[in-house]
Image (spheres, helix red, strand yellow):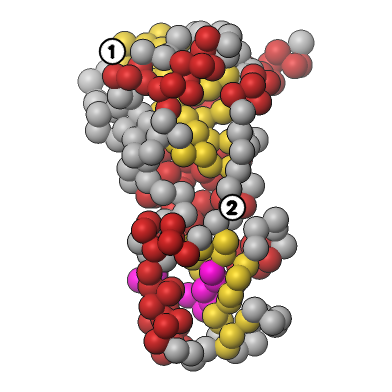
Amino acid sequence: MTKADIQLVRSLADKRGRAEHGLFLAEGEKLIGELRASHLRVRKIYALEGLFTGAEVETVTPRDMERLSQLKTPSNSVALVEIPHYRLKTAELRNRLTLALDEVQNPGNVGTIIRLADWFGITDILCSEGTADCFNPKVVQATMGAILRVRVHYRPLAPLLAEAAAGGIPVYGTFLEGKNIYTEALAPTGIVVMGNEGRGVTPAVAQCISRKLFIPPWPADRRGSESLNVAMATGIVCAEFRRQTALRSAK
């Protein structure tokens, strides 16, 4: 293993390095095993002895793994994976439920939301350019493999949402002044916007939202926390959309 190998792996902790090399890092035997069976291309694997076999696998020592791993407790394997590039047309959003992340900046939140999308059968997430990079090592680990099944697209959100709304696609968003999500009739398809952890939805994106929703506390007049964590709120919103769709299907 050379110094150049180590420098390459370390450079992928930074967004600029990932863009330059077209690669992202994945760690751990389970995740790398899933990656090898997926549509993504694994360029290189550094692993402790006996974990993997193949032309792209290089066996390294525990000491080397400490130098390569981005985790506090070093993993047993690190993979260099080619960053996928997905195409998406606005018309494709018409018949599905889609999430949009507006300046969500915490990597853990973005990773958890990708995992939630996978759980609730949401195949695409639209992200503003200020949202945390989905191929940040912390995000990749937080997705628990969901990054293999959910396509993440980085676009200027306001024009895309405006085009979607003009085409008749419902655009939802969560706001303190929104209507109670549990009493509103929710369409089975549309785009759901989740805003920044501290500032919420940006003004430009808010103008594109046709239906504002609110997750009420219990009881409704209770004085407690001012807001929910964005990943937690996303889970509640997705569950309610899918619940209402299931009820309609059962009738």
State whether residue 45 is above or below residue 113. Answer: below
Give the percent coordinates (x, y) of residue 29: 59, 72
Which residue bears the numbered disc 2? 84
Q: Is residue 208 magenta?
A: no
**Quarter of the figure with the C terminus:** top right
Q: Where is residue 189 in the image (x, y as percent from the top left)?
A: 62, 19
| Amino acid type assigned to the residue bearing label 2 in the image | Pro
Kind of residue at badge 1 = Asp
**Quadrant location of residue 190?**
top right
Estimate the spatial distance between the alpha carbons at disc 1 and disc 2, rounded to whole Å: 47 Å
Q: What stretch is highlighted in magenta?
A: 70-80
Quadrant position of residue 175: top left
Q: In this view, does 50 lie above or below 109?
A: below
| Up/down of 63 relative to 157, above or below | below
Q: Check disc 1 and report the residue beneath it.
A: 221
- What count of labels does the image hold? 2
Q: Residue furthest front?
A: 20
**Residue 1: image location, x then y, percent:** 48, 90
- The local crowd at label 2, few if under 14, some if 14 to 19, many if 20 or more residues have their Cα within 10 Å, is some
Q: Does the magenta stretch include residue 73?
A: yes
Q: Which of 201 and 159 is in front in this view?
A: 159
Name the residue nearer the viewer: 115 or 102.
102
